[in-house]
Image: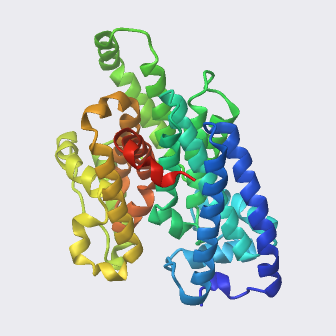
């Protein structure tokens, strides 16, 4: 039996319906506040989704449906004892401890109720992300957000990590808050700052990404000719590089240089070498080496776990395999309306920057699947737009 199921008591099951109803109504309240007006669908969607997830959780309790990840023992122990090992990262010692433990206490120390909160944070992040896409592109078609909510709810990573005491649900909430906050006229708003704070205490690497996106957003809003903007960026590049290098050194403790990036990857790779699923070593002595390797790193991260899946019996890693297949399906939906993609340039840039940054640091095949989740969710916005654009004749399926 999984470690977090060992202390289940009967009253945990008794309180489950109360928490179920509470979380359902909070989700409805938040969705109706920020999404397009579509009350009937929202009511039905979140009820069906919570029932679906509840069934998965109860089945997993009996037949081990959800994989048991290596970090699970550590995070379960932190939840149950409140003690964090001193050798853990800031994201675990501060972020996870001071977020997850209060939630666990609020759950009456019931892992079932805690998983309901996990689902809640995932879905709340998705609600904010759908609303961000709506506001960014002035979308009024409810089918875009309908398809987004449906597609995002069945991402294998989200389903799996909803039932593990890890940090992924908090990451998705941070990303949703950040991108929704970015749609406000005044960027220094509460939601954006909350997203940044959550990212900073959970996975500090996200901070650098968020700062780049904020800078990019300001540049994109400058009312100048594109050629003038391009020239200004070229002239300002040394200053921008110095700023990014300073942020990377402060936040990640890694200066932006070929030698330091390759050293970081290779050292981390050696720490996890015995897992058998680490990426090969890299040898970067200059920026030309990095440039030559970048396309391979980019697609290696984007398409994980498939570039090297042949070395791993896929039936032993079904959750990762399913996530990879689902990602390819989402990618296919995105590229169908190829001529329409130019209308979503800034959103595509957000995705490319995230994948590019993550690819430099990712050294673990299965870790790449986990860390790709934000890019998957951003892509699902484009996939939802594609479905709403090309499949109007199938809308009758969803009528009720």
Q: Quadrant of residue 365?
A: bottom left
Which residue is drawn at the image coordinates 53% and 39% (left, top)? Answer: 142
The image position of residue 62, as x and y in percent, is: 60, 89
Q: Quadrant of residue 2?
A: bottom right
The image position of residue 376, as x and y in percent, is: 41, 52
The image position of residue 225, as x and y in percent, is: 34, 9
Which residue is drawn at the image coordinates 42% and 21% (left, top)? Answer: 220
Q: Quadrant of residue 310?
A: bottom left
The answer to whether residue 96 is seen in the rendering is: no
Which residue is drawn at the image coordinates 59% and 69% (left, top)? Answer: 52
Which residue is drawn at the image coordinates 55% and 36% (left, top)? Answer: 132
Q: Is residue 327 left or right of residue 310?
A: right
In the rendered view, tell whether residue 88 sits above or below residue 80: above
In this picture the colour scheme is rainbow
The answer to whether residue 352 is seen in the rendering is: yes
Count of residue discs: 0
In the rendered view, tell whether residue 176 sits above or below residue 344: below
Q: Along the line of sight, which residue is nearer the eye, 298 or 249?
A: 298
Q: Along the line of sight, which residue is nearer the eye, 168 or 17?
A: 17
Q: Along the line of sight, which residue is nearer the eye, 32 or 390?
A: 390
Quadrant containing the N terminus is bottom right
In the rendered view, tell whether residue 123 sits above or below residue 343: below
Q: Is residue 96 left or right of residue 110?
A: left
The image position of residue 293, as x and y in percent, is: 20, 50
């Amino acid at each position: 039996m999984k470690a977090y199921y060992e202390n289940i008591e009967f009253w945990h099951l008794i309180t489950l319906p109360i928490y179920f109803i509470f979380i359902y109504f909070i989700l409805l309240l938040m969705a109706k506040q920020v999404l397009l007006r579509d009350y009937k669908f929202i009511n039905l969607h979140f009820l069906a989704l919570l029932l679906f997830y509840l069934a998965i959780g109860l089945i997993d309790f009996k037949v081990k449906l959800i994989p048991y990840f290596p970090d699970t023992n550590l995070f379960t122990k932190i939840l149950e004892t409140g003690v964090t090992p001193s050798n853990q990262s800031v994201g675990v010692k501060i972020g996870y401890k001071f977020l997850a433990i209060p939630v666990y206490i609020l759950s009456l120390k019931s892992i079932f109720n805690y998983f309901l909160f996990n689902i809640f944070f995932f879905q709340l992040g998705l609600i904010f992300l759908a609303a961000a896409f709506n506001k960014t592109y002035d979308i009024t078609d409810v089918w875009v957000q309908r398809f987004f909510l449906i597609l995002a709810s069945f991402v294998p990573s989200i389903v799996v990590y909803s039932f593990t005491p890890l940090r992924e649900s908090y990451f998705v909430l941070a990303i949703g808050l950040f991108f929704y906050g970015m749609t406000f006229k005044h960027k220094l708003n509460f939601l954006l700052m909350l997203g940044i704070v959550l990212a900073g205490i959970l996975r500090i690497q996200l901070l650098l990404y968020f700062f780049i996106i904020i800078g990019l957003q300001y540049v994109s809003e400058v009312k100048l000719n594109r050629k003038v903007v391009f020239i200004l960026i070229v002239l300002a590049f040394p200053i921008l590089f110095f700023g990014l290098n300073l942020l990377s050194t402060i936040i990640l403790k890694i200066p932006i240089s070929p030698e330091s990036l390759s050293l970081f990857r290779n050292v981390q790779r050696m720490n996890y070498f015995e897992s058998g699923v680490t990426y090969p070593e890299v040898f970067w002595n200059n920026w030309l080496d990095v440039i030559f390797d970048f396309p391979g790193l980019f697609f290696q991260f984007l398409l994980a776990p498939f570039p090297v899946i042949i070395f791993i019996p896929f039936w032993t890693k079904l959750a990762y395999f399913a996530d990879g297949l689902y990602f390819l399906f989402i990618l296919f939906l995105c590229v169908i309306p190829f001529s329409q993609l130019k209308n979503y340039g800034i959103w595509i840039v957000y995705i490319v920057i995230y994948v590019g940054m993550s690819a430099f640091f990712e050294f673990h095949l299965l870790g790449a699947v986990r860390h790709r989740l934000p890019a998957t969710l951003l892509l699902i916005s484009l996939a939802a737009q594609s479905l709403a654009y090309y499949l109007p004749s199938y809308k009758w399926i969803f009528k009720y």
